[in-house]
């Protein structure tokens, strides 16, 4: 356990909170709590690589059995010594075995053990292990199915463990498939201490508080949500006498927030560790909390009621039905609507979101009414109250919002069900840089189309649909943790996330949306010798764009279209230096071919460094993920944003006139798109207004991906009950679909 504070020694050892006695020259103090060692053990995790679950449990039992032998031998030795039987032990050494030393301390109760177990079967094995060898488990980590077996966990030896969870990080592996965002509330109701986790760098630990905020949004009471990232993990680590608390005598580790910590976008004004200011020095001149002066920012957000959804999660063991409760083809009247943002119709105004009520989210105590007929808005305003009397269904939004459906970009939505299970997705694509594409494919580049591999009805897609993300543009360029996608990412497709199958009339919006490639240096975990050099990647792209391949092949045909500007070329790239090279290449191709290319940078971590140049050559940018992070060397100049910098990459790009969209490469997090957008608004100190915010994940993406004529005023709208779509007050309750001529009641 360390504190994230630089020390004068500049060593990792000096950052430890309480190193074991003697490790740094310290000696036991009987007046202070004892010091702990820490051990993490995995059960059922990635068993495909190491064996099966029986192998895992047997290996743990075997290890603990050996440790028990050593412990018992030590106890027998000490008993004889205490009895004065020196002759019996004169020729013996104290029994020790370095292989089992840590587990011996576990059996003696000197170690805080964390078990990384996801499924009920793994949790069961861990509990039985604790009972057999009589050691305490301090916490279960990644415990996705813990909420389904509270009775089992109550039998853990020595008392109930702390349960560490993600908020909505589910379905990324088979063990997490039944994970539920309602699990923290369910476990808290059973009396379990709940800690929210990041599993850094799976999730950026800088945003750990967002996990607690989401847990609160889905039902965890405010005190428990705050405790889940403060006092609960401190107690699980045996350090509650020092950290995770504010009281006299505790460590002076304090954060002063610009708003209640459970409010979306809550930002530290100042951070002290051991009483030493780490963040928020006045000389930094970083503006924090602009626009958060009203009293409601001082309280937890008024979150929606998810009791019915929580009960369904338990009833169906994490796999509750996700289909709409009802689809209405007739008239639907929405009452008490506080904000209305609609797509403006007409060819001259395509791609613009217009506020019809509550302009730009300004304070407005009034509410209005909206009437929908056959999936189209026919009336907005007080006069609609009379028109809605003949409605088939009346929906009271209680001060809610109607806004454009959002689009996902950058994830594997629609081409896989479980990220780490290839059997649930499209499979392995040929990489022409690493292998020869079979001649029967008829294309040396192995260029493929996403619409040939689309999966409909996946849980990730349906969850996103219910969260207001009604469209998705998906390519084969996937950028999982610390990895970079293949050079040729194929042809993306745009589809509706709620469609049942590809044959439904409105399911596929555009079967070929854009051509995708990925350019960058080798990622840390890649097989570097097999990754082509950066110069080789650029040379290959130049050749393909300058008619270096037979246009009778798929690769030749589509790269020619990209060079001519008839299809967008979306390049997954992080480094500003590589972007500068690509800008030069774009100019070279356009000059030699006499064409205009529609180029887009996605991921684009360092794009803000070239904002002026990118705007000048009319290249679009899709920031994915919305909050940049230095995953690899190419991302090292990621802009931190508040509280470390005034500006964000998004704000800088927009201020220079760059057309920007937001995406998210991690499929389970697509459902958080509206929170990402709301957060971006707050990080800009409200320089970005709500209209612009909705455009970032709707019409801007459509413009960049040449989808304006394919969606337009036929785009979906989403109705949110109780508040805004861009914070923790609103809950999606209906989807208005002009294309389907109906309203889906969620």
Image (cartoon, grey):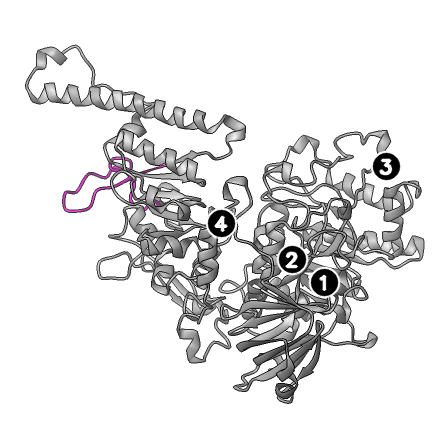
Question: Mark 3 highlights which residue?
Answer: 443
Mark 2 or 4, closer to the camera:
4
- Relative depth, front residue between 708 and 635: 708
Q: Main secondary structure of the magenta part?
A: loop
- First in residue order: circle 2 vs circle 4: 4
Q: CA distance from mark 1 to mark 4?
A: 33 Å
Q: Residues within 10 Å of mark 4 (few under 14, many from 20)?
A: many
Q: Is residue 635 above or below residue 693?
A: above
Tell me, yes or no, if residue 5 can be seen here: no
**Quarter of the rendering containing residue 617:** bottom right
Q: CA distance from mark 3 to mark 2?
A: 30 Å
- Whether the magenta-drawn stretch holds residue 539 is answered as no
Q: CA distance from mark 4 to mark 3?
A: 43 Å
**Quarter of the rendering containing residue 396:** bottom right
**Quarter of the rendering containing residue 279:** bottom left
Question: Mark 2 highlights which residue?
Answer: 663
* Cβ atoms at labels 3 and 1 below 8 Å apart: no
The x and y percentages for residue 21 are: 24, 37
Q: Is residue 690 left or right of residue 730?
A: right
Tell me, for residue 318, which label it has, or none: 4
The residue lying at 33 percent from left, 31 percent from top is 129
Secondary structure beneath disc 3? loop
Q: CA distance from mark 3 to mark 1?
A: 30 Å
- Whether the magenta-drawn stretch holds residue 30 is answered as yes
Please give the range of residues in magenta.
15-39
Q: CA distance from mark 2 to mark 1?
A: 9 Å
- First in residue order: circle 3 vs circle 2: 3
Q: Residues within 10 Å of mark 1 (few under 14, many from 20)?
A: many
Quadrant in which the N terminus is drawn:
top left
């Amino acid at each position: 356990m360390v504190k994230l504070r630089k020390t004068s020694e500049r060593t990792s050892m000096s950052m430890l909170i309480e190193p074991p006695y003697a490790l740094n020259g310290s000696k036991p103090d009987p007046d202070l709590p004892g010091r702990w060692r820490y051990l993490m053990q995995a059960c059922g995790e990635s068993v495909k690589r190491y064996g099966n679950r029986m192998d895992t449990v047997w290996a743990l039992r075997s290890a603990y059995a050996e440790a028990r032998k050593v412990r018992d031998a030590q106890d027998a030795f000490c008993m004889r010594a205490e009895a004065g039987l020196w002759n019996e032990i004169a020729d013996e050494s104290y029994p020790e075995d370095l292989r089992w030393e840590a587990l011996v301390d576990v059996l003696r109760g000197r170690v805080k053990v964390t078990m990384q177990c996801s499924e009920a079967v793994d949790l069961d094995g861990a509990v039985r292990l604790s009972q057999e060898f009589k050691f305490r488990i301090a916490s279960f980590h990644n415990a996705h199915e813990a909420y389904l077996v509270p009775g089992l966990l109550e039998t853990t030896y020595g008392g109930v463990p702390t349960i560490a969870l993600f908020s909505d990080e589910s379905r990324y592996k088979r063990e997490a498939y039944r994970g539920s965002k309602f699990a923290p509330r369910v476990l808290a109701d059973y009396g379990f201490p709940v800690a929210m986790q990041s599993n850094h760098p799976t999730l950026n630990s800088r945003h750990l508080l967002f996990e607690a905020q989401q847990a609160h949004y889905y039902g965890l009471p405010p005190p428990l949500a705050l405790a889940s990232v403060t006092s609960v993990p401190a107690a699980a680590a045996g350090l509650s006498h020092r950290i995770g608390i504010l009281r006299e005598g505790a460590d002076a580790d304090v954060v002063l927030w610009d708003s209640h910590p459970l409010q979306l976008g809550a930002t530290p004004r100042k951070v002290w560790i051991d009483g030493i200011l780490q963040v928020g020095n006045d000389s930094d001149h970083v503006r924090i909390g602009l626009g958060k002066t009203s009293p409601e920012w001082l309280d937890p957000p008024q979150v929606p009621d998810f009791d019915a959804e929580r009960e369904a999660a338990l009833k169906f063991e994490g796999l509750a039905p996700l289909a709409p409760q009802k689809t209405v083809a007739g008239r639907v009247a929405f009452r008490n609507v506080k904000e209305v943002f609609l797509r403006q119709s007409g060819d001259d105004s395509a791609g613009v979101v217009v506020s019809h009520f509550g302009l730009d989210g300004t304070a407005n105590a009034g509410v209005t009414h909206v009437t929908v007929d056959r999936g189209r808005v026919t009336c907005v305003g007080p006069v609609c109250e009379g028109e809605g009397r003949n409605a088939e269904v009346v929906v009271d939004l209680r001060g809610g919002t109607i806004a454009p459906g959002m689009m996902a970009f950058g994830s594997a939505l629609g081409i896989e069900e479980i990220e780490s299970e290839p059997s649930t997705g499209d499979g392995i694509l040929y990489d022409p840089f690493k292998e020869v594409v079979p001649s029967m494919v008829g294309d040396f580049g192995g260029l493929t189309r996403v619409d040939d591999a689309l999966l409909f009805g996946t849980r990730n897609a349906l969850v996103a649909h219910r969260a207001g993300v009604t469209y998705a543009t998906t390519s084969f360029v996937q950028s999982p943790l610390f990895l970079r996608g293949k050079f040729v990412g194929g042809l993306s497709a745009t589809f509706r996330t709620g469609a049942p199958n590809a044959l439904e009339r409105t399911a596929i919006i555009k079967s070929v949306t854009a051509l995708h490639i990925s350019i960058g240096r080798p990622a840390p975990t890649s097989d570097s010798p097999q990754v082509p050099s950066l110069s080789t990647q650029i040379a290959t792209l130049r050749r393909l764009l300058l008619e270096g391949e037979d246009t009778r092949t798929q690769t030749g045909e589509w790269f020619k279209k990209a060079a001519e500007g008839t299809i967008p070329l979306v390049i997954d790239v992080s480094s500003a230096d590589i972007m500068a090279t690509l800008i030069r290449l774009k100019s070279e191709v356009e000059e030699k071919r006499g064409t205009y290319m529609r180029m887009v940078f996605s991921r684009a971590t360092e794009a803000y460094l070239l904002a002026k140049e990118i705007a000048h050559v009319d290249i679009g940018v899709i920031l994915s993920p919305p909050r940049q992070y230095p995953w690899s060397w190419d991302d090292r100049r990621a802009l931190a944003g508040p509280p470390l910098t005034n500006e964000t990459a998004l704000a800088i790009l927009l201020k220079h006139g760059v057309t920007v969209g937001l995406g998210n490469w991690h499929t389970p997090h697509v459902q958080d798109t509206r929170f990402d957008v709301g957060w971006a608004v707050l990080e800009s100190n409200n320089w970005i207004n709500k209209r612009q915010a909705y455009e970032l994940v709707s019409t801007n993406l459509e413009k960049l991906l040449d989808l304006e004529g394919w969606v337009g005023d036929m785009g979906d709208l989403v109705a949110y009950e109780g508040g805004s779509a861009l914070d923790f007050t609103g809950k999606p309750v209906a989807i208005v679909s002009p294309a389907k001529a109906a309203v889906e009641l969620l």
